[in-house]
Amino acid sequence: MENISVAVVGAGIAGNFHCNALKQVYCTRVRLKTIVDVDTERAYDLLEKWGFQNATADYESVLQDPEIDLVCIALPTVLHADFAIKALNADKHVICEKPLTGYFGLPEEGFPAENTASKRKMCDSLLKDMSALRQAIDKSKAKFLYAETYMCFPNCASIAESVRTLNVRVLDIAVECSIHGSERDLIELRKHVGDSSLMRVAAYPLSSMLFGKQLEARIHDEDIYATSVSAEMGQKRADNSACAENFVNIAVTFSDGCKGVVYSCDKSYYDHTQGRMRNWIKSSFDNGYNSQNTITPADNVKLYFLGQEGYESAWRQTDWFNKYDADEAYNKYIIELNRFIGRVVKNRQGSSGFSHAYDCVKIIHAAYLSAEEGRCIYPTGNARQ
């Protein structure tokens, strides 16, 4: 395959990231064929910005287009599995955004579903959804690739590189991603991506940890998987409105004895330190080697504001703020998309596929169940069953 034709489904922030990265793919020639969004005005905006040939609200037209080889799904989490299954059934390669899927409830359960539904019901429902996706992958001639950008950041990749070059084992690993709390006007968006810190935030460092362990397993030619999950969660919102948990602490034990910890919170309710985001990854190895790094450049720019609007108290009108420079995120999308496109061109499965996405969702909902029942959960099932 000398060139590849692509459809991007979703003209929001993630879709824009995908478009930017696809324009800079260097491993083969990429043709931006179709941009899809129910908001056709947004779709046409990206058509003009990135040079797509078509813009449409009709996803079926993409599935029926014989020229399209690859579908990038950059939609809200609630739509991921359904759109991926349809693309795979049409033998289109799929790059799917993260998290793979989530539980968003029935109308009678209210919002947020994570706070009202039985966690056992959530687990059973999600395992059923992932089973349907697994069957579509098995039947399709196309590849399924899971877009988890965190794994492309150098500080995550350095763990695997240490294991590879030093021939060591990871004894324990801890990760955090905490952000400033959601704004009230995002409540409709949260209905589609998850209201909880676990779905919105903790899923990403968890995925990084699992990806590192998968690479370690590959290097040592063995199967490493989560054997137990224990979690604590809390709820706190300043206006006392309904909310899912916004504090998460997850402990994972792996089959090789490695211990993993994932921590996340909405900083506005639990942590009043400066800056919008805080994230880090810490690891120790069996040769005494230790590493501690930030995962993303969450505070690579500092800005000083004088007389900022909206502050009523004079003492709050000047302050330093940490800023996340999005250019770095774009760069990692470019790295990730090049890897994915290269795999599609050679018809090979990438290192981040369904098993990675499956394990992440399985542990997320084992954590929900652990917190609800107050006990350790021993996950069963795997992506290959």
Image (cartoon, rainbow, N blue to C red):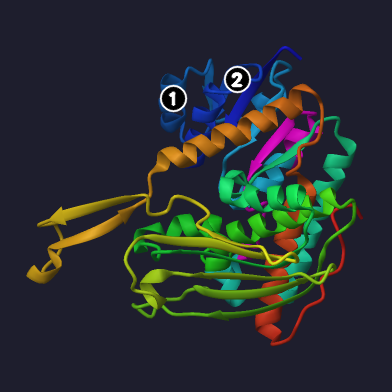
Vertical placement of 25 versus 339: above or below? Answer: above
Residue beneath the point at 62% across and 32% down: 337
Vertical placement of 269 versus 88: above or below? Answer: below
Vertical placement of 318 versus 357: above or below? Answer: below
Label 1 amino acid?
Answer: Tyr
Q: Extreme bottom residue here?
A: 374
* Front label number (1 vs 2): 2
- In the figure, is residue 235 to the left or right of 100? left
Circles 1, 2 touching at the beta carbon (< 8 Å): no
Q: Earlier in the sequence, mark 1 or mark 2?
A: 2
Q: Is residue 31 magenta?
A: no
- Across and down, in percent, residue 139 comes to 89, 37
Which one is in front, 166 or 19?
166
Residue beneath the point at 86% across and 68% down: 380
| Residue holding disc 2 | 26
Position of the C terminus by quadrant: bottom right
Report how many numbered discs are placed on residues in the image: 2
Label 2 amino acid?
Answer: Tyr
Measured in 3D between alpha carbons, the distance from the residue under mark 1 to the one under mark 2, in whole angstroms, is 25 Å
When asked about the image quadrant of residue 59, the answer is: top right
Residue beneath the point at 35% across and 59% down: 185
Q: For the magenta stretch, what is the residue range?
A: 85-106
| Residue holding disc 1 | 44
User: Could you classify mark 2 by the number of other residues whose Cα lies within 10 Å: few (under 14), some (14-19), or many (20 or more)?
Assistant: some
Q: Secondary structure at mark 2?
A: loop
- Across and down, in percent, residue 244 comes to 52, 73
When asked about the image quadrant of residue 141, the answer is: top right
Residue beneath the point at 69% across and 20% down: 68
